[in-house]
Structure formats: C-alpha cells, structure tokens
C-alpha cells in the first residue's frame, strides 16, 4: 500500500488539475484542426502534441518539466527561451522564398508595410490594458502573423508571456483561411475583387542575386536589433539565388527547417503548462492577438484601395490582405477569394509580393522595438 501511495503521489492522477484537463483539451483541438481541417499541420501537430506533453502533471523534483534545469525538455527549450530557433527558421524561409514578385512590382512593398499597422496599434492597445512597454511590444508583434519573430521578440522582452504569445501567433497563422476572407469581402466590392492586374515582369538573375545583399544592408542599418533574423533570411535567399550553393539551399529549405520546426513547435507546446499559462493575461494576449491580426488584414486591404485612387494601374485590393507575413498562406487565401469571383483571375503571384514584404516588415518592426524599448 505504501508503494501504491508513492506511485499515486508521483504520478499524473495525484496531481491532475482542472487546468491540466483544459490544456489537454486545447492540445487535442489543435491536433484535430491540423489533421482533419489541414490548418497548418506542420505547426499545429507539434504544438498540439507538445501541449499534451507539457500538461501531464507529476511530483516536483523529477527533473522532467521544461523549466526544471537539467531536464531533456529544458535543454530543448533553450532554443526558444534564448531565441536560437527563430533565426534558423528564417534561414530556411529565405532559402525557399522567391522575391521576384516583389522585385517586379516594388510598389506592392507598401502593402506589406501597411499591414504592419496591426503591430503598432496592438502595441498601443496593450499599453492601454496595463501591460508595460516591453510586454506590449512583444504582444503587438503577433499582428505580423509571424510566429518565429513573435518568439524571438518575446524571448527578449517578455519571457514570462512567451508561451501565450507563441501559441497565439501560431494559432492565428493557422486560422488565416478562416479569419481573412470575411474581412476582405467586408471591405471590398465585387467590382474591386474582379480587378485584373498586369502580369509580373521578369526579373534578371543578377537582380535576384544582388537583392538579398543590398536588402540586408539597408534593413540592418534601419533596424539593427533584427540583424539575426534579417541576416539569416537574406543569407538563405542568397544561397538559393546565387546558383553555386544549391546543396546548401536545398538542405536549408528541406531537412534543416523541418528539424527546427519540429523542435520549435514541440517546445512551444510544452511551455503551456496550465499553472503558468491559464492566467487572465493569457486571455488578454489572445484577444489582443486576434484584434491585431484583423487590423493588419484590414490595413493592407484599405491601403490597396487608397493606392488605386492615385495609380494608373489598378491593384486588386484582395492582395492587400497578404501583407501579413503568414507565408504563403495569406497569398493562397487571396487567390482563393479572387477565384470565387473569377476562376480565371490568378492573384497568387501578385499576392506573394506583399506577403514576402510582410516578412521583412515584421522583422524590421521587431528590430525597432528591440532597439528602442528598454527594461
């Protein structure tokens, strides 16, 4: 009986709380969305299963939790808490990103910049709700719909809310096909959604090679705080475009980014332990994150409509929604919404321009916050 009593005290049954049950159900919902609805399965499957792993309770001192120094999960979580994983993710993103659509129509970069309004408006909203400047900046970056950037910034400015911010960012990235279409349709007319844009002009190989070098120098000078993110992004793109490092580029955009995504997703999920995660502040972060994502989508669409007032070549305002940096899901959503009106109107290549510009924009915004906001 004494052995059974010790077993009960050390195991899950003796320490299970309603919070653990709630978080386990959340993890199961994530897995259901990923497997049955195909919502960002590469992200939600690791995060969802990580939530299950992180919410199995046990006795203190067993060296199993992510926040118990020396445990296996603690070592893996250092990539999140110290900000190692996000730059590595950006390396893979750079190696798989084609900036040709943006380079062929530079004015569409403005749509990616406009969508960052969600970041700064949410920053102000978080301050109004009682968060300090550091916390507000980390929460605001959710509006960029860029999970790695959100993790990178929150690990530096608000590590106490890292789990909530990361889960919120990735959740809204996964829900892009649900959130964005109603906003696009609300803010545009059918006539606007039927606008056909001119085909993208070809971009020379020399331009594609020079771009990551020049773009890094410019953005790093503007936002030195984001050098690790932007440096990896443009380095990965140079590996792809140079034509002489295809083996490295292929590794970066396939096996390498897959490994880091597994570790990042799993450890983010593990960090959502109920006692630390289920707090009023976490719910506020989720609410602010949803608002920021909606504002970012609306800002991109409305800015595209405003540009049509002064430009000769009309822009289909649908692609303004792609200014958030959920690559390439936002561009796919724009294509889907446009195809519902006219199946022969192909918007995805045009939408990729503000989409990849949004990746750069959210990283620059993170760098600005990191450089200007102090403890």
Image: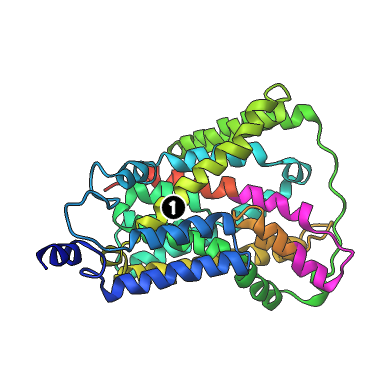
Relative vertical location of residue 188 with respect to residue 12 in this rendering, above or below: below
Kindly indicate the quadrant of the structure image that contains residue 2: bottom left
Which coloring applies here? rainbow
Asked if the magenta segment contains residue 225, the reply would be no
> Callout 1: 10 Å neighbours few (<14), some, many (20+)?
many
Whether residue 308 is visible: yes
Q: Measuring from the top left, give residue 339's x and y in whole percent.
A: 82, 68
Is 354 covered by the magenta stretch? Answer: yes
* In front of the other: 217 or 18: 18
Q: Quadrant of residue 85?
A: top left
Q: Is residue 291 visible from the viewing direction of this image?
A: no
Work out whether 205 lies above or below 128: above
- For disc 1, the marked residue is 266
In the rendered image, residue 299, in percent from the top left (x then y), is placed at 60, 65
Span of residues in magenta: 335-358
Point 34% across, 56% down: residue = 271
Location of residue 201 (image quadrant)? top right
Q: 356 and 40: which one is in front?
A: 40
Q: Could you say whether the residue bearing mark 1 is in a helix, strand or loop? A: helix
Q: Is residue 174 left or right of residue 245?
A: left
Main secondary structure type of the part rendered in magenta: helix
Residue 90: give x, y in percent of width and height. 54, 41
Question: Residue pushed farthest left?
Answer: 2
Whole-percent x, y for residue 32 in the image: 54, 69
């Amino acid at each position: 009986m004494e052995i059974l009593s010790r077993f009960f005290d050390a195991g899950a049954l003796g320490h299970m709380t309603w919070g653990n049950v709630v978080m386990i159900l959340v993890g199961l919902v994530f897995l259901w969305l990923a497997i049955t609805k195909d919502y960002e399965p590469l992200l939600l499957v690791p995060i969802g299963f990580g939530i299950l792993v992180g919410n199995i309770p046990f006795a203190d001192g067993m060296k199993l939790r992510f926040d118990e120094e020396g445990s296996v999960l603690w070592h893996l979580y250092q990539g999140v808490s110290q900000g190692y994983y996000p730059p590595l993710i950006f390396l893979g993103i750079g190696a798989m990103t084609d900036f040709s659509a943006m380079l062929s129509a530079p004015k569409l970069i403005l749509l990616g910049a406009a969508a960052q309004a969600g970041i700064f408006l949410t920053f102000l909203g978080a301050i109004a709700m009682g968060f300090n400047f550091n916390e507000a900046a980390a929460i605001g970056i959710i509006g960029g719909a860029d999970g790695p950037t959100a993790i990178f910034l929150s690990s530096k400015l608000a590590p106490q809310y890292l789990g909530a911010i990361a889960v919120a960012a990735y959740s809204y990235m996964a829900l892009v096909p649900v959130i964005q279409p109603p906003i696009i349709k609300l803010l545009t007319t059918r006539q606007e959604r039927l606008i056909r844009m001119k085909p993208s002009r070809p971009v020379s190989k020399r331009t594609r090679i020079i771009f990551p070098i020049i773009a890094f120098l410019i953005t790093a000078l503007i936002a030195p705080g984001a050098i690790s993110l932007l440096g990896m992004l443009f380095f990965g793109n140079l590996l792809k475009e140079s034509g002489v490092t295809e083996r490295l580029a292929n590794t970066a955009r396939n096996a390498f980014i897959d490994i880091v995504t597994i570790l990042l997703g799993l450890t983010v999920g593990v960090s959502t332990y109920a006692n630390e995660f289920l707090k009023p502040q976490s719910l506020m972060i989720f609410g602010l994150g949803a608002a920021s994502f909606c504002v970012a989508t609306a800002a991109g669409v409305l800015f595209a409509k405003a540009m049509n007032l002064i430009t000769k070549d009309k822009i289909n305002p649908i692609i303004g929604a792609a200014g958030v940096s959920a690559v390439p899901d936002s561009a796919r959503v724009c294509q889907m919404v446009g195809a519902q009106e006219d199946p022969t109107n192909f918007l995805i290549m045009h939408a990729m321009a503000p989409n990849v510009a949004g990746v750069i924009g959210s990283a620059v915004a993170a760098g600005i916050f990191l450089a200007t906001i102090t403890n």
